[in-house]
Amino acid sequence: MATIDYHWQRFSSGQKLARFSVYLFFITGFLYSIRSVEVIPDFLYDAPEQMMDLLSRMWPIDYSFYPLSVHDAMIETLNIVAN
C-alpha cells in the first residue's frame, strides 16, 4: 500500500507572489525616499537631547498662561471655524 505524502503550505503561489510584490514595492519606495530626502546627520546626533529639552519645558504644564493668551486665541479660532 502506497502512502500519500501531503505537504501543507501556508500561502499559495499566487499569495506568495502578491506578498513579494507588496514587500518589493514598499522597500523600493523606502529606498527612493531615503535617496531623495536630504537628511543632515549632524541634526540626528543631538535629536534625543533636543527631544528631552522640549519635553522638560512642556512638563509640568503651566496653566497660568491660559487666561492671558491661549483662551482668546482659542475662542477666535472657534469663531473662524463657526463662520
Image (cartoon, rainbow, N blue to C red):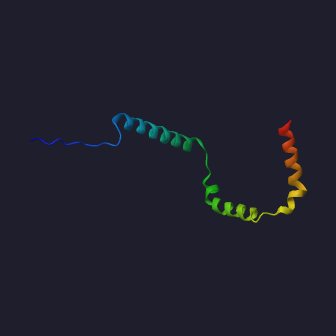
User: Extreme left residue here?
Assistant: 1
Residue at the spot 42% in from the left edge and 39% down from the top edge: 19
Image quadrant holding the N terminus, namely: top left
Q: Nearer the viewer, residue 45 or 14?
A: 14
| Furthest residue in direction front, as rendered | 1
Quarter assignment of residue 13: top left
Q: Nearer the viewer, residue 14 or 58?
A: 14
Answer left or right for 9 relative to 82: left
Which quarter of the figure is the C terminus placed in?
A: top right
Counting from the top left corner in percent of width and height, residue 72 is at 89, 50
Residue 17 in picture, x, y percent from top left: 38, 35
In front: 11, or 31?
11
Q: Residue shown at 81%/63% (left/top)?
A: 62
Q: Is residue 45 above or below residue 79?
A: below
Q: Quadrant of residue 78?
A: top right
| Residue 20 pos. (x, y %) | 41, 39
Report the number of discs: 0
Image location (x, y in percent) of residue 34: 55, 44
The quadrant holding residue 10 is top left
In this picture, residue 53 sits left or right of residue 24: right
Between 29 and 78, the residue placed more toward the observer is 78
In this rendering, position of residue 77 left or right of residue 34: right
At x 53% / y 40%, what residue is drawn? 32
Q: Which residue is pictured at 86% across the width and 63% down the height?
A: 64
